[in-house]
Amino acid sequence: MLAEKRRNVILNGDSIELMRRMDRDSVDFILTDPPYLVSYKGRDGRHLRNDDNARWLRPSVNQMHRILKPGGFAISFYGWNRIDLFAEAWKAAGFRMVGHIVFRKSYASSSRFLRYEHKCAYLLAKGDVTPPARTVPDVIDMPYSGNRLHPTQKPVEALLPLVEVFCPPGGLVLDPFCGSGSSLVAARDLGRDWIGMDLDPDHAATAARRLASHDGERVAG
């Protein structure tokens, strides 16, 4: 019953358990940036919970598929050097990989064998889907967010066209790894409902404050 009664809220907790409380086929669109399984540590020393293991990956993807409406889309960022684990989880849950998006940065986040100047995400489909009336390019510019609110904060500008195209007006956007809440701000600004989840209480509080600065949403436990 959660999806019907508690929209426009940030939930602090294990997103697998939180999604299990949601009705099947209750979400219109999922847009998320989960841990990449690379034990990330930023230059400022910040790190991400559960980025050092993949135990959560399949159960999380299974729940995402269960609560997404048939014919719906999900977009998930992923770690390029862990694509085997992400692709296996998506396919095992029943998702089809129907598109790939490159987010082009104006800077290199690191440089070793190559200069790493992009992020990437897959467009996933549940069941028989209808192509959107308007398509977006598979290369999108990603301005630098500054990572002030989260170690891997995504800019809202890069996410707006995805919400607009893949979530119907009045639909519900879910982000089970919402971090600072950029995906939810995009949903809100386009008039969509939203639910955000994060395991880290500090990130959940940050996202809640960010959304509340506009229209008073709050953290729920």
Image: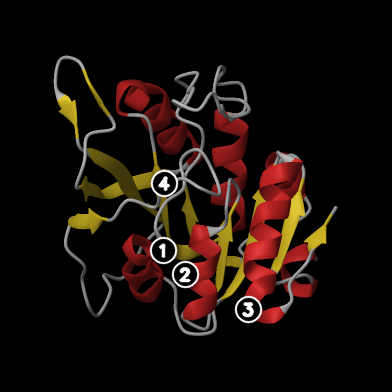
Relative vertical location of residue 143 with respect to residue 5 in this rendering, above or below: above
Q: Amino acid at mark 4?
A: Ser
Q: Residue at x 32, y 61 (%)?
A: 158
Mark 2 lies on residue: 186
The numbered mark at residue 214 is 3
Specify few, some or many for label 4: CA neighbours under 10 Å numbering under 14, 14-19, or 20 or more.
some
Is there a contact, CB below 8 Å, between mark 2 and mark 1? yes
**Between residues 59 and 179, which one lies in front from this camera angle?**
179
Q: Is residue 158 visible?
A: yes
Q: Residue at x 50, y 28 (%)?
A: 44
Kindly indicate whether the residue at mark 3 contacts the one at mark 4 (C-beta within 8 angstroms).
Answer: no
Residue 208 point in image, percent of width and height? 70, 61
In the displayed structure, 206 sits above or below 110; it is below
Residue 23 in view here: no
Quadrant into which the N terminus falls:
bottom right
C-alpha gap between disc 3 and disc 1: 15 Å
Instruction: Indicate the amino acid at tag 1.
Output: Val
- Neighbour tally class for label 2: few under 14, some 14-19, many 20 plus, Cα within 10 Å: many
Residue type indicated by callout 3: His
Percent x, y of residue 149: 55, 49
Which dot, 2 or 3, sits closer to the camera? 3
Q: Residue at x 58, y 47 (%)?
A: 179
Under tag 4, what secondary structure? strand
Q: Earlier in the sequence, mark 2 or mark 1?
A: 1
Estimate the x, y position of residue 58 in percent, counting from the top left: 56, 30
Q: CA distance from mark 1 to mark 4?
A: 15 Å
Earlier in the chain: of badge 3 and badge 1, it is: 1
Cα separation between marks 2 and 3: 12 Å
The reply to whether callout 1 and callout 4 are in contact (CB within 8 Å) is: no
Q: Indicate the secondary structure of the residue bearing disc 2.
A: helix
Read off the residue under disc 1.
156
